[in-house]
């Protein structure tokens, strides 16, 4: 394997991270930043941060459903699944 790109988290997000998800259709990668309760969304082609999902407590796992344009985020503290429209961030 060969490193092709590095995406650097802003300093306020550099804490405990867990799962990530890749949305190939829109070239986005999402990372569960458990320590801050946010999900940064990067464009993996450019490496740029394009959106931050806030309002979570401890995001953990993801499921992307491109067919219905939805991102499902499991939150250990909120005790449920948060559902987001994938069309919003680009």
Image: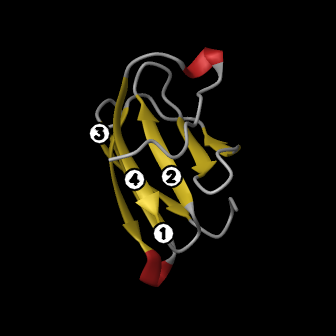
Q: Residues within 10 Å of mark 3 (few under 14, many from 20)?
A: few
Instruction: List x then y, in percent, for residue 78.
Output: 36, 35
Q: CA distance from mark 4 to mark 2?
A: 6 Å
Locate the C terminus and report the quarter of the image it occupies: bottom right
Q: Residue at 48%, 28% (x, y): give it.
A: 37
At horizontal 64% and vertical 70% (from top left) the residue drawn is 87
**Quick one: label 4 or label 2, which is nearer the N terminus?**
4
Circles 4 and 2, Cβ within 8 Å, touching? The answer is yes
The mark nearer the N terminus, 3 or 4, is 4
| 32 up-or-down from 13: above or below | below
Q: Earlier in the sequence, mark 3 or mark 2?
A: 2
Q: Position of residue 26 (x, y in %)?
A: 59, 69
Would you name the residue on which mark 4 appears? 21
Q: Which residue is mark 1?
A: 24
Per the image, the residue denoted by label 3 is 79
In the picture provided, is 82 more to the left or to the right than 77? right
Q: Earlier in the sequence, mark 2 or mark 1?
A: 1
């Amino acid at each position: 394997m060969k490193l092709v790109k590095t995406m650097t988290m802003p300093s306020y997000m550099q804490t405990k991270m867990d799962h990530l998800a890749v949305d190939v259709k829109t070239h986005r990668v999402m990372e569960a930043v458990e320590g801050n309760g946010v999900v940064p969304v990067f464009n993996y082609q450019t490496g740029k941060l394009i959106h931050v999902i806030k309002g979570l407590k401890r995001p953990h796992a993801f499921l992307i459903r491109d067919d219905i344009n939805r991102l499902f985020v499991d939150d250990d503290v909120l005790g449920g699944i948060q559902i987001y429209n994938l069309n919003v961030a680009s």
